[in-house]
């Protein structure tokens, strides 16, 4: 069964989409079966995967509103080898349409049931807000990855996000937990960066990934070529950092699975 992970932070420009695209590419490079779903009407993750958002026949809009199933909506030939359900401006209508649909918080969860066994990981990219689309993502995920830029205002709003995750955990999805906090656009030369980073570790402990994503121009350039950094410049520091993150995520997941197996045997 796929591990479903939501990449979210209600702040814009913190590296959500960059993380989603490059983590998906890195996991696919290690032969994991990956589906990425773009849940942002801006469609940046779609374009960054080398798919023209304007030419999508089916997208996450049709998936959420039940007009297409996941096997119909997915594209299976992105350059980096992961599967993609793309998004474009159509998705803005979904939020309103969802309001009148039954089980509106669980549309994505229901839609992904049939493809759960096709993948090792399903990654969900989100808009910079906490709306019904994000609630759908959180309601079907086992973990949340929170990219954070280590700047002065980074911690502002984080308690609202943690509060939302706790509420979803209590009301909609008891399996949901914070998978990891990812420090993005990291510049260790700045003392402010180091201070905020230390605060994050104090607050979230071992939830903070050891892997740090550096500020790297290749990560910023790659989307304009419709490629993850791994295909654009595979030896760039950005590409290597996301490969390391994929390794960390895989190891953590294997350890959790082993612990769950052991617990089952003793039960
Ligand atoms: P979000 O999805 O949270 O809005 P993005 O991933 O789109 O954020 O990143 C915002 C901008 O910063 C984009 O132009 C992106 O290319 C750039 N960017 C993201 N991560 C890095 C990084 N590690 N180094 C340099 N530029 C980055
Ligand atoms: Mg984005």
Image (cartoon, grey):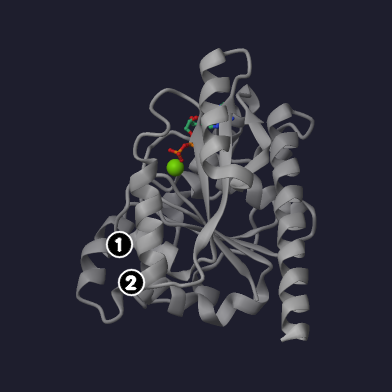
Identify the residue at image location x=55%, y=36%. 202
Q: Quadrant of residue 92?
A: bottom left
Q: Quadrant of residue 27?
A: bottom right
- Give how far across and how far down residue 255 sits, in percent: 76, 62
Residue, disc 2: 105
Looking at the image, is mark 1 or mark 2 earlier in the sequence? Answer: 2
Picture quadrant of ligand 2: top left
- Secondary element at tag 2: helix
Task: Work out which quarter of the rendered image holds the N terminus and state it.
Answer: bottom right
- Give how far across and how far down residue 232 sits, in percent: 70, 34
Q: Is residue 71 above or below residue 89?
A: below
Q: Is residue 105 left or right of residue 16?
A: left
Q: Which mark is residue 132?
A: 1
Mark 1 and 2 residues: CB-CB less than 8 Å, in contact?
Answer: yes
Q: Of residues 186 and 85, which is closer to you in this image?
A: 186
Q: Is residue 222 left or right of residue 97?
A: right
Q: Quadrant of residue 32?
A: bottom right
Q: How many marks?
A: 2
- Secondary element at tag 1: helix
Q: Is residue 3 left or right of residue 154?
A: right
The answer, for residue 165, to whether it is visible in the render is: yes
**In whole angstroms, how far apart are the C-alphas of marks 1 and 2?**
7 Å
Identify the residue at image location x=57%, y=33%. 184
Q: Of residues 79 and 204, which is closer to you in this image?
A: 204
Q: Is residue 238 above or below residue 20?
A: above
Identify the residue at image location x=42%, y=76%. 68
- Give how far across and how far down residue 225 sits, in percent: 59, 35
Task: Work out which quarter of the rendered image holds the C terminus and state it.
Answer: bottom right
């Amino acid at each position: 069964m796929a591990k479903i992970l939501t990449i979210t932070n209600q702040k814009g420009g913190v590296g959500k989409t960059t993380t989603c695209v490059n983590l998906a590419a890195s996991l696919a490079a290690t032969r994991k079966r990956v589906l990425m779903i773009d849940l942002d009407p801006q469609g940046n993750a779609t374009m960054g995967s080398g798919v023209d958002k304007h030419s999508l026949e089916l997208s996450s809009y049709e998936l959420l509103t039940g007009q297409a199933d996941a096997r119909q909506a997915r594209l299976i030939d992105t350059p980096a080898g992961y599967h993609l359900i793309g998004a474009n401006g159509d998705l803005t209508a979904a939020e309103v349409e969802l309001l009148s649909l039954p089980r509106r918080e669980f549309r994505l969860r229901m839609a992904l049931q049939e493809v759960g066994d096709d993948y090792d990981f399903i990654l969900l990219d989100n808009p910079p807000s906490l709306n019904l689309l994000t609630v759908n993502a959180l309601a079907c995920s086992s973990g949340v990855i929170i990219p954070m830029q280590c700047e002065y205002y980074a911690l502002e709003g984080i308690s609202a996000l943690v509060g939302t995750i706790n509420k979803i955990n209590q009301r909609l999805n008891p399996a949901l937990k914070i998978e990891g906090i990812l420090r993005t656009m990291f510049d260790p030369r700045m003392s402010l960066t180091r201070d905020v980073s230390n605060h994050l570790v104090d607050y979230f402990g071992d939830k903070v990934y050891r892997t740090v994503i550096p500020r790297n121009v290749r990560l910023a350039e790659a989307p304009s070529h419709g490629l993850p950094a791994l295909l654009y410049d595979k030896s760039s520091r950005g590409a290597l950092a996301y490969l390391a993150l994929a390794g960390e995520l895989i190891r953590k997941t294997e350890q959790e699975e082993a612990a769950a197996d052991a617990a089952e045997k003793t039960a």
